[in-house]
């Protein structure tokens, strides 16, 4: 059900993504994340094209944490910030963070390979139905994504590539 991937540049770390639908406690989850009671990034999946996008953001966040160059206070908030094409942290959270009204959530956990208990602890806190991570594309709000990333009509055929490109180049633009 969940999707775990080893990070090539950081082989001791894994990124696990878990997608939930019919979530009834989004406000509580968001509050727990803010208070540091959930060690995960909670992302609004409607703003995602594919789970690869999250892997890119997590990889970059971990790299920035290791070299001491994060722009936010935690690895989890850095993942959310790195999804955004904008350089404003508040805008990133508005677009990609979950709100109390959301009924779907993507939980993203960066962990070392031995921390499997962490995943079940987090899963237990979500009042919702876990579905395969590949279902993200069925939740995507393509119109909002195109607007946020300023996708041109020519780029629509390769939406994921265009989105990842915007994420990757925001620091250099």
Image (spheres, rainbow, N blue to C red):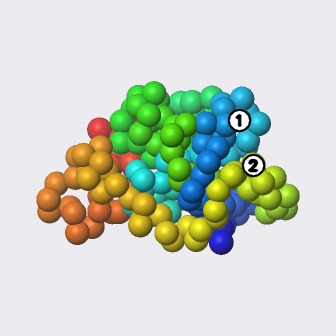
Ranked by sequence position, the earlier of labels 1 and 2 is 1
- Callout 1 touching callout 2 (CB < 8 Å): yes
Quadrant (top left/top right/bottom left/bottom right) for the N terminus: bottom right
| Secondary structure found at label 1 | helix
Q: Label 2: few (<14), some or many (≥20) within 10 Å?
A: few
Is there any visible trace of residue 60 in the rendered image? Answer: no
Cα–Cα gap, marks 1 and 2 = 9 Å
Looking at the rendered image, the quarter that the C terminus falls into is top left
Closest to the observer: 151 or 141? Answer: 141
Neighbourhood count class around disc 1 (C-alpha, 10 Å): few under 14, some 14–19, many 20 upward: some
Above or below, 39 relative to 116 = above
Q: Which residue is mark 1?
A: 32
On the rendered structure, is 151 left or right of 78? left
Residue 125 numbered tag: 2
- Residue at the extreme left of the image, as rendered: 153
What residue is drawn where x is 60% and y is 52%? 23
At x 36% / y 36%, what residue is drawn? 86
User: 116 or 126: which is nearer to us?
Assistant: 126
Q: Secondary structure at mark 2?
A: helix
Would residue 37 be found to the left or right of residue 74 on screen?
right
Q: For the image shown, how many numbered marks are present on the structure?
A: 2
Look at the picture and state if 119 lies above or below 144.
below
Does residue 154 show up? yes
Q: Quadrant of residue 6?
A: bottom right
């Amino acid at each position: 059900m969940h999707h775990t991937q080893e990070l090539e540049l950081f082989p001791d770390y894994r990124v696990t993504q878990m997608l939930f639908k019919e979530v009834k406690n989004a406000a509580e989850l968001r509050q727990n994340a803010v208070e540091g009671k959930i060690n995960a990034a909670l992302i609004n999946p409607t703003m995602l094209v594919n789970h690869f996008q999250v892997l890119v953001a997590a990889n970059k966040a971990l790299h920035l944490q290791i070299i001491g160059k994060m722009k936010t206070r935690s690895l989890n908030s850095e993942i959310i910030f790195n999804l955004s094409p904008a350089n404003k942290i508040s805008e990133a959270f508005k677009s990609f963070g979950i709100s109390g009204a959301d009924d779907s959530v993507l939980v993203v956990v960066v962990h070392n390979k031995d921390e499997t208990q962490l995943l079940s602890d987090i899963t237990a806190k979500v009042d919702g139905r876990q579905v395969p991570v590949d279902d993200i594309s069925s939740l995507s709000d393509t119109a909002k994504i195109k607007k946020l990333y300023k996708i041109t009509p020519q780029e629509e055929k390769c939406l994921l590539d265009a989105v990842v490109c915007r994420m990757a180049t925001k620091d250099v633009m």
